[in-house]
Amino acid sequence: MSIIANRFGVMLAALILSSCVQGKDYQRPPVEIPDGWSRIAKDSDTSKTTDQQPEAEWWKAFKNEELSGLIERALQQNHDVKRAIARVLEGRASVMSAAAGLYPQVNLSSSYSNIAVSENTFAGLGLATGQQPRPQTFATPGTNFDLWNSALDLRWEMDFWGRIRRGREAAMADAQAIEQDARAVALTLVGDVGQSYFRIRELDEQLDIAQRTLAVRQEYLEIIRKRASVGLASEFDVKRTEVLVAEAGGLIPDLARIRAVESHRLEVLIGMSPGSLDLHSKPLRSVVIQPNIPVGLPSQLLERRPDILQAEATLVASNARIGQARAYFFPTLSITGQGGLQSAEFSNWFTGNSSNYSIGPSIILPIFQGGTNLARLDSAESRHVQMLENYQQTILQAFREVADLLTSLSARAEQLARQREQLSAAQEAMRLADIRYRKGLVNYLDVLDAQRTALGAETQLVLTERTRLTDMVSLFKALGGGWTSPPNKNPA
C-alpha cells in the first residue's frame, strides 16, 4: 500500500510540475516620461542627490515637534486609518481563501442511523434504479438494523491549468491594492493634518496683526481726540478714526471664529472630540521652517506613490484573471476519495473488518456552457484594458500634480522675496508717516494710507508663507513621501 501511495504521489507531483498555467505573466507596461520633467525639476528650488533615500516620517522636515506629535496621534487614532487597516486584514484573509483550493479538502463525518427496510421491495432494488450502493440496498426486505458510520471525505482538484493559482495571484494583487489604498489614506491624513495646522498658525498670526492694528488705531484715536480738543483736528477726523477702530476690532472675533472651526477640523482628524484640543496661539513664522524638498526621479515616483502602486496592483489582478478565465475552457481533474468505518453493531465499529474506502480520479470536460466561459474571458480581457488605461492615466496625473506643485513652489519663493521687500518698505513708510504726522507735517489720511499698505503687505506675506507650506505638504504627498540622506557609514 505504501509503495502504491508513493508512486501515486510522484505521479501527482510530476503532473502538477508539468502543468500549463494559462495566461501571460504580468509585465509592467512601458511608461512615457514627460519630456519636460528634467527641466521642471531643474528649474525648481528642489533637488535630489544620489545618496538620498526615502523617508517615511517626512513631516519631520518641518522641524516642529508639536506638528509631529499631532500627526503621530492622528495615525494612531483616526477612524479612517483604523478602517483602512481592517480592510487590509480582510484582503489578506481573501488571499488565504483563494489559495485554499491548492490543497486537499478533507472532512470528517460521523453518523448513527436506525434503518427499517420496506417489506414491499427487493434486495438490491436500489442498484437497478441507479442508486449508489448502500447497506439498505442489499438488506432483506422487512429487516430493521442500526448503522454506525464514520468517514473521511477527500477532494483535491489538480490545478493543471493554473486556474486556482491565477486566482490566488489575483487575490494577492487585490490585497496589495488595498494596502496601497490604506497607505494613501494615511498619506492624505498626514497632509490634511499639516495643512490644517498651518492654517491655524496663519490665523494666529492674522489675529496678532489684527490686535496690533487695533492697538495702533486706538492710540491714534486718543491722539486725534487730544488734537481735536485744542483745535488741531476736526470732529470728522475723530469719527473717521472711530470707524477704523471699530473696523479693526470687528476683524478679531471673525478670525477667532474661523480659527475655532479649523481647530474642530483638526481635532476630528486626530480622532478627538471638537473642543478638546488646546493649541496655544503661535504665529506661523515662529513654529516652522521652509524645508527644501528633493524631487527624485520619475522611476522613483512610480515606485512610491500609493495611487500608482494601487493602479498597478489592479492591473496585475486583471491580468491574472484573464489566465483564470482561460482555464475554464479546459478539463478539471480532481482526486476524490472516502474512507472510514461502518458497522451495524457499535461493538464492532472500530474493528478492522469495519473499514471501507474508495479513491480515484474524476474529470469534468466542459462541452456546452451557453457562452458562460466566453463571456467570462471577454469580461476579463475588457477589465484588463480598463485597468491598463487607468494605470497610464494615473501616472500622467501624478506627473502633472508634481509638475504643478514644483512650478508653484518656485513661483512662491520669488513671490515671498518680493513681498518681504514690500513689507519692509511699507513698514518704513508707516514709521515716517507717523513721525511726520506727530510733527504736524502731514494729515491723518497719509498715516491711514501707510497703515493700510503695511497691514495689507503683512497679511499677504503671511498668506503666501502658509500657502507655500501647504504646497510643500502637497508635494510631499504627490511624491509619495520625503527623502533623507542616509547615515554616514564611514564617520571620520
Image (cartoon, grey):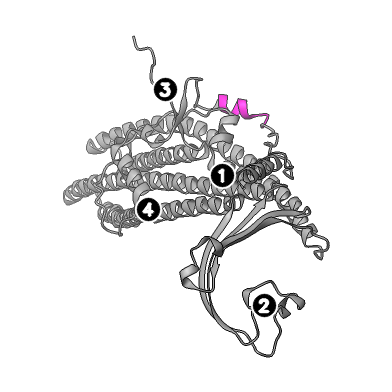
Asked if residue 101 is positioned above or below residue 194 in the image, the reply reads below
Q: Measure how far apart labels 3 and 1 are at the Cα level.
A: 26 Å
Relative placement, left or right, of 66 versus 136 is left
Q: Position of residue 31 (x, y in %)?
A: 68, 34
Disc 4 from disc 2: Cα separation: 65 Å
Q: Give me the C-alpha separation between circle 2 and circle 3.
A: 79 Å
Q: Secondary structure at mark 1?
A: helix
Nearest the viewer among 139 and 467 is 139
SS of the residue at dot 2? helix
Residue 137 numbered tag = 2
Residue for badge 4: 78
Foreground disc of the pair 2, 1: 2
Residue 35, magenta (yes or no): yes
Question: What amino acid is labelled 3 in the image?
Answer: Pro
Q: Earlier in the sequence, mark 2 or mark 3?
A: 2
Which structural element holds mark 3?
loop
Tag 2 and tag 1, C-beta contact below 8 Å: no
Name the kind of residue labelled 4 in the image.
Answer: Asn
Residue ID for mark 3: 486
- Label 4 with label 2: CB-CB less than 8 Å: no
Please provide the residue range marked out in magenta: 34-42
Q: Where does label 1 land, which residue?
A: 307
x 38%, y 17%: residue: 488
Q: Nearer the viewer, residue 368 or 110?
A: 110
Which residue type does callout 2 highlight? Thr
In primary-sequence order, the first of circles 4 and 2 is 4
